[in-house]
């Protein structure tokens, strides 16, 4: 009886360890089913890009003339560049409409984050002008890919790579940091990104407008006194002393003469006789 109890106790203690081991195996299998998102390319990622282009029924342009035809049919649209992104030596500045939307949205956030333009180095490339090291499943001829220059600014590189990995984690694109020549290769999944972009609020960036400065005040001109109207007193002139009126002067002189005459008569009456 004691032995059976010991065996049951050991079995019960071992049960949690068995459950943990099974859970660990489940996590490992889940991780294997969903590979880690990285900037490293792989044959599987190229196959995925190609399958998306085929499922979208995209035409792979063979020659520059084929690119021009796709443009004329509005299957490809021009990317002219703006304040947020610029094109550098891009032979065919055209791509699928969703790629244009992607570049405009991402470049606006990029410039706001690190203060420089995002530089596009390649868009649609016909198969006859592909570089020698291009992958046979490249989706550049389908207008579904865009290449970006790698910034020399570490802050900008870190921000950009995190942004690409976040979008790749949502299964909207496949991004690779190429080594020869150094650049970022991004294949956008048009249908998925179209749905994603439609749910986003448009960026509220006011259009640039010229700065309007207030008018400069004109220097004050020296004021000149206005000419007084006819008959009006001149208030700006210094006050002149009032002159005595002629009748008052005459009256005063008359009083003095009268006093002098009275005094003379009194002196004459009381003088020696």
Image (cartoon, grey):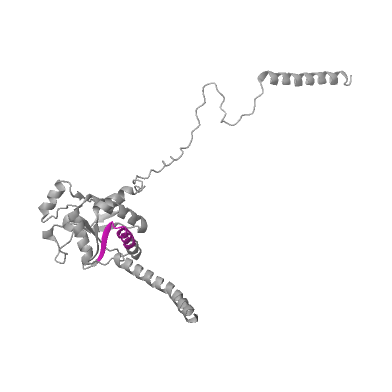
On the question of residue 123 being in view, the answer is no
**Is 124 on the left-hand or right-hand side of 247?**
left
Q: Position of residue 185 (x, y in %)?
A: 24, 62
The answer to which quarter of the image holds residue 46 is bottom left
- Comparing 64 with 90, the one in front is 64
**Is 260 on the left-hand or right-hand side of 156?**
right
The residue at the far front in this view is: 1
**Is 204 on the left-hand or right-hand side of 185?**
right
Q: Position of residue 242 (x, y in %)?
A: 65, 26
- Magenta segment range? 160-177
Q: Residue at x 13, y 50 (%)?
A: 68
**Is 36 on the left-hand or right-hand side of 52?**
right
Q: Is residue 51 magenta?
A: no
- Comparing 145 with 122, the one in front is 145
The answer to which quarter of the image holds residue 49 is bottom left
- Comparing 121 with 34, the one in front is 34
Q: Residue at x 77, y 18 (%)?
A: 258
**In this view, 194 is above or below 182:** above
């Amino acid at each position: 009886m004691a032995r059976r109890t010991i065996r049951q106790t050991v079995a019960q203690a071992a049960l949690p360890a068995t459950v943990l081991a099974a859970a660990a195996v489940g996590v490992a299998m889940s991780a294997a089913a969903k590979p880690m998102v990285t900037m490293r390319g792989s044959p599987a990622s190229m196959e995925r890009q190609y399958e998306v282009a085929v499922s979208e029924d995209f035409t792979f342009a063979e020659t520059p003339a084929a690119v021009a035809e796709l443009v004329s049919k509005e299957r490809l649209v021009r990317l002219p560049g703006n304040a947020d992104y610029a094109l550098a030596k891009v032979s065919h500045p055209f791509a699928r409409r969703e790629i244009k939307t992607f570049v405009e949205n991402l470049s606006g956030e990029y410039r706001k984050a690190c203060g420089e333009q995002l530089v596009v180095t390649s868009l649609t490339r016909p198969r006859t002008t592909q570089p020698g090291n291009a992958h046979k499943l490249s989706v550049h001829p389908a207008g579904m890919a865009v290449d970006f220059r790698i910034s020399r600014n570490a802050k900008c590189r870190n921000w950009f790579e995190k942004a690409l990995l976040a979008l790749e984690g949502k299964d909207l694109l496949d991004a690779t940091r190429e080594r020869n020549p150094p650049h970022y290769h991004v294949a956008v999944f048009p249908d998925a990104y179209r749905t994603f972009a439609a749910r986003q609020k448009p960026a509220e960036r006011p259009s640039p407008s010229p700065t309007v400065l207030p008018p400069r005040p004109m220097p004050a001109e020296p004021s000149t006194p206005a000419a007084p109207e006819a008959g009006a007193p001149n208030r700006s002139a210094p006050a002149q002393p009032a002159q005595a009126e002629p009748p008052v002067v005459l009256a005063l002189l008359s009083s003095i003469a009268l006093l002098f005459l009275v005094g003379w008569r009194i002196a004459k009456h009381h003088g020696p006789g």
